[in-house]
């Protein structure tokens, strides 16, 4: 009896380990933009919803003279997230996935001034995006002296095709007596009918 219980326990542990190994973990990427005044902006994106800013795989730093078009990334075949890799292995399958991104702005002293984020969920089946929902855009943090003015735009392209894009832009303002400055961080995420995050673009800081 004791031997059987031990065997059952070993089988249970082995099964649980196999299940956990088969579950793809969310993978996160980030890209950093450096400005001439010493301030920085970090864009972070994840296939597990809104990410922790600056976490995950580093996609590189962009200098002050880098063009705005460099604030983007397209995931090539074989260069996808862990979750995406499992989806690609069963291409044409059916499922649901959520992707998210955030833009964090830090001043020249290294102090975070604000962070803006968006996430979105979509269903997919047989290489098509079947429905898109639960798109959220929000302020994550504002440092005293900065104020969140709201989300000026939040939208996504329609479902029914092989790919879709989701966009959000927020507005922030900082005023010192009568002198004000503003920034409008934005991001655009792209996903496809296999539940895969395929790329992003960001800016506005």
Image (cartoon, grey):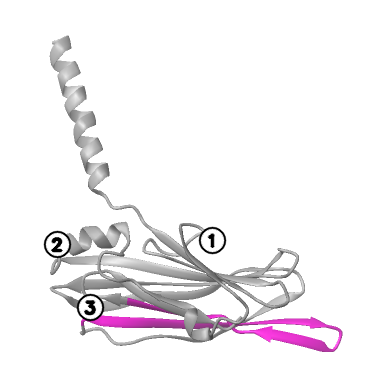
Mark 1 residue element: loop
Mark found first going from the N terminus, 3 or 2: 2
Q: Which residue is mark 2?
A: 90
Observer-nearest of 10 and 133: 10
Residue 178 is one of the magenta-drawn residues? yes
Mark 3 to mark 2: distance in Å? 15 Å
Q: Which residues are magenta?
A: 162-190
Mark found first going from the N terminus, 2 or 1: 1
Crowd around label 3: few <14 · some 14–19 · many ≥20 (10 Å): many
In the image, what residue occupies the spot 33% across and 52% down? 25
Q: Which residue is mark 1?
A: 54
Tell me if residue 171 comes above or below residue 88 in the rendering: below
Tag 3 near tag 2, CB within 8 Å: no
Q: Residue furthest top?
A: 2
Residue 120 is one of the magenta-drawn residues? no
Tell me the mark number nearer the camera, choosing from 3 and 2: 2
In the image, what residue occupies the spot 15% across and 66% down? 91
Crowd around label 2: few <14 · some 14–19 · many ≥20 (10 Å): few
Mark found first going from the N terminus, 3 or 1: 1
Q: Which residue is mark 3?
A: 129
């Amino acid at each position: 009896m004791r031997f059987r219980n031990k065997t059952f326990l070993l089988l249970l542990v082995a099964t649980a380990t196999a299940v956990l190994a088969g579950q793809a973990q969310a993978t996160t990427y980030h890209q950093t933009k450096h400005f001439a005044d010493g301030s920085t902006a970090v864009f972070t994106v994840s296939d597990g919803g809104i990410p922790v800013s600056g976490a995950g795989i580093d996609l590189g730093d962009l200098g002050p003279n880098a063009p705005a078009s460099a604030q983007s990334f397209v995931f090539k075949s074989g260069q996808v997230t862990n979750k995406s890799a499992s989806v690609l292995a069963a291409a044409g399958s059916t499922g649901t996935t959520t992707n998210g991104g955030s833009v964090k702005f830090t001043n020249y002293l290294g102090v975070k001034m604000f962070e803006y984020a968006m996430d979105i969920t979509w269903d997919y089946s047989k290489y098509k995006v079947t429905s898109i929902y639960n798109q959220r855009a929000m302020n994550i943090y504002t440092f005293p002296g900065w104020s969140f003015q709201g989300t000026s735009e939040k939208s996504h392209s329609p479902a029914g095709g092989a790919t879709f894009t989701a966009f959000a832009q927020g507005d922030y303002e900082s005023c010192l007596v009568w002198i004000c400055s503003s920034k409008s961080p934005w991001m655009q995420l792209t996903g496809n009918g296999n539940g895969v995050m395929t790329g992003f673009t960001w800016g506005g800081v």
